Amino acid sequence: MINIVYHYHVVKTDNQNNHMEVEYSADGHDTVLVGMPFPLEGDNLESHFRAYAPIYHWVISKKKPQKIEVGFKGTISPPAKELPKQEVTKEDIEHLIKSLIESPPTL
């Protein structure tokens, strides 16, 4: 979990389009200006400002970017569906060994 204490300050509003610009700041991080819609009637204001906070930007800005060359390409496929895990008990193994002894497979 990322714990960054930050502050927000509405610096510009556009009442005609129901949008605003909000400046977010946090110690040790750059100040970020974010455009966002006005909260709707009944919305929780703290939740609204939290939803647009640039937490991800602050986290990745501390990491060094990888260099990607022109022409780099790839394919993204959905992950393979994981089969449900099945626990094998001591009794299962004993049963398998007994059945192999009683009727060995033919080659």
Image (cartoon, rainbow, N blue to C red):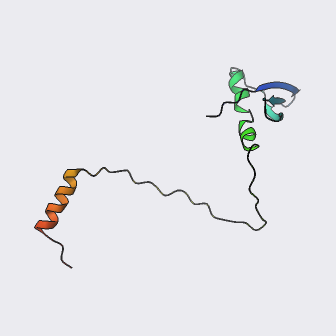
Please indicate whether residue 73 sits to the left or right of residue 98 in the image: right
User: What residue appears at the point 15 percent right and 63 percent down from the top-left corner?
Assistant: 99
What x and y, as percent, mark residue 73? 70, 66
Quadrant assignment, res 5: top right
Q: Does the image show residue 105?
A: yes
Which of the pair 95/63 is nearer the observer? 63
Q: Is residue 106 above or below residue 52?
A: below
Q: Quadrant of the N terminus?
A: top right
Report the residue at 83% width, 29% height from top.
22
Indicate the quadrant containing the C terminus: top left, top right, bottom left or bottom right. bottom left
Q: Is residue 93 above or below residue 45?
A: below
x 83%, y 33%: residue? 31
| Picture layout, residue 18 above or below residue 93 | above
Place of residue 82 in the rendered image (x, y in percent of width and height, measured from the top left): 44, 54
Quadrant hosting residue 34: top right
- Tell me where residue 4 appears, x and y as whole percent: 70, 30
Across and down, in percent, residue 100 comes to 16, 66
